[in-house]
Image: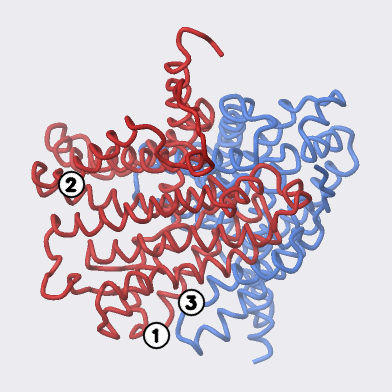
Amino acid sequence: MDPSGIFSTSYARDRALIRTRAQWVALALFIGILLIYPWFASARLVAIANLMLVTSIVVVGLQITTGYAGQINLGQAAFMGVGAYAASVIEVKAGLPFWVAVPVGGLVAALAGWLFGLTAARIKGFYLALTTIAAQFIFHFMVLNLPSDWLGGVNGFSLQPAQLGAFVFNTDRSLYYLFLVVTLVMVFGAFGILRSRHGRAFVAVRDDDVAAGMMGVDVAGAKSRAFVLGAFYAGIGGALWAYQVRYVSVDQFTLFNSIWFIAMMIVGGLGSLVGALIGTVLIRGVQETITSLGPDLVERIPSLSSDLIFASMNVFLGLIITLFLLLEPKGLMHRWNILKANYRLWPFHH
Amino acid sequence: MIIEFINYTINGALLGLLYSLVAMGFVVIYRASKVFNMAIGEMIVLGAFLLWWAIQSRGMHPALGIAVALGISVLIGLAIERLLFRRLIGESVFSMIMVTIGLLILMRGLVLVIWGPQERQFPAIFPLAPIILGEMIIPRSLAIGGLIAVLAAVALHWFFNRSRTGLAMSAVAEDHQIALAMGISVRRSIAFAWALGGVLSVITSMVYLSGKSLTVLSSEIGFAALPVALLAGLESIGGLLLAGIIVGVVQGLTAAYIDPLIGGNAAAVVPYIFMLVVLVVRPTGMFGWKRIERV
């Protein structure tokens, strides 16, 4: 809903993502803050921000598949892993630069997404959820059991830092800018896709696929496109992840990670791109706080062990998912939208 | 050679029956509540830890320990219904699955907090000595487990397809709203489902872990049993036995003959590939219900 007094006088205005001058200012300020952030934050905080940026790309992809197109995907971490491994193979075996490796990572993951999207065209609901779990297990198996000079086996891959011409992205700060640019492009791309006819088809399929089919939406096509897109985002995120940690191994991409991604999406709000970003930042923030406060706590209270910290992370994740689904199933963005609508309508109710 | 083959086949089939016992946990809860319980592996581990706590740690007589564990897990099942699923009646498939996944992680966390990650020796509830028939060696707990699986399948099949209460529950599995409109208590049905799921998971844990070591990672059997439930179709209890035997035998033979060739662990993933093929060819499984969709 627009603030009062704002009327779209042309179709282009009606479709615009940024609708008022205040929104332009807010966006410019926000990006400005993101740009100067690494000069004020400590190295550790910049590294955390890098992880958040990478994760937010992956969660935005999941939001497209699950939040917009309604296709449950419990294998997002596997697609991320496919991207990370594809980029590593390109980098380590073929020696190509990162600006080839990252898009290739995305494309290979998209191919994997397409394969699983094929099943999504036929099945739905929890059967689909189970297929994507199978993706997770099959990915794990492929990496561990293919000959180890192909995909590194249990040892994984070590990568060289990303390089652009003579410039080497070997500090967290330089990587931050790289990731920020990629994330901005990916997020704006997602906004663009979701307001196009494909995005509207996704929403129609999510709300009722039988009805959407009768309205002339290509349901099977929309579902498989949603999977391809979501997996592409996961692949790009995975490839960037590979350059951030510079070491890729199979236990970075488990079912557990996929569930974390879903938790981020639920907390932020299903069917909202901004929600995906907010959920990512919040959950990653809490995760990092627990892991960095953990050793401190163990030192102060010796009866706690580090196992307990890990276990409490589980309890936290489980509680977050169940409580949000029970109490606030539409996520934090829903609350925010209510607040915004009330503010704009005040003092009226409707 | 041929004896070896028979041996692998029989052991595979018995392992498959264990899978079908685990999968019965999925199907029983699904058949009475339309909830697909991803947390079944965690429920089994929880049941196992309750048994371990009662028998090994408190030193109760096994029979008493089993009774106590059964009682507690029924209470936990009822609590799950009261706290979570009563609020979700009529909600979307996505919420239901995600809540059971949340439950999975929560239970794993709680087990870790209460009992820790150490390995525990699970009490030998069934005698450890294997059954030896000629040249065939059959683990006794698996053999008894197979028998239990068959008995449980027969009893549950009768209950859900013949008895009045069971048929009412099947209506709940078809559609919550319609069941409510027909005067069936959806709440009671879901509560019963989770209590029954608790009982089944304690029984399964006895078969699965008798005399072995128990850790929080033992819950992996829950995901290993997924392909069995899907192959049978989520609504069929009798079909589980056949599906379990098929998956078990395929897995056993892969482990015996293909793994040495490729030098890997193909047996772990064969059931999932099998499951994918089944889902693509026949999404409702061998004996599942076909649904007609209307706008």
Please state if B80 lies on the left or on the right of A162 as rendered: right
Which residue occupies 14% across, 44% down?
A36
Location of residue A318 (image quadrant): top left
Say left or right for B280 vs B260: right
- Numbered disc 2: secondary structure: helix
Whether residue B252 is situated above or below residue A315 in the rendered picture = below
| Residue position for label 2 | A35
| SS of the residue under disc 1 | loop
- Residue B165 image point, x, y percent: 84, 32
The chain coloured blue carries which letter?
A: B
Which residue is at a point 42% across and 38% down the rendered structure image? A275
Image quarter where the N terminus of chain B lies is: bottom right
- Tell me which colouring the rendered structure shows: by chain
How far apart are the alpha carbons under marks 3 and 1?
Answer: 12 Å
Residue identifier under label 3: B265
Q: Are marks 2 and 3 in contact (CB under 8 Å)?
A: no
Please tell me how crowded label 1 is: few (under 14), some (14-19), or many (20+) other residues with Cα within 10 Å. some
Real-space CA distance between mark 2 and mark 3, rounded to the nearest whole angstrom: 48 Å
Identify the residue under disc 1: A147
Looking at the rendering, in which quadrant would you find the C terminus of chain B?
top right
Q: Is residue B214 visible?
A: no
Residue depicted at x 51% and y 71%: A111
What chain is colored red? A
Residue A155 point in image, percent of width and height: 28, 74
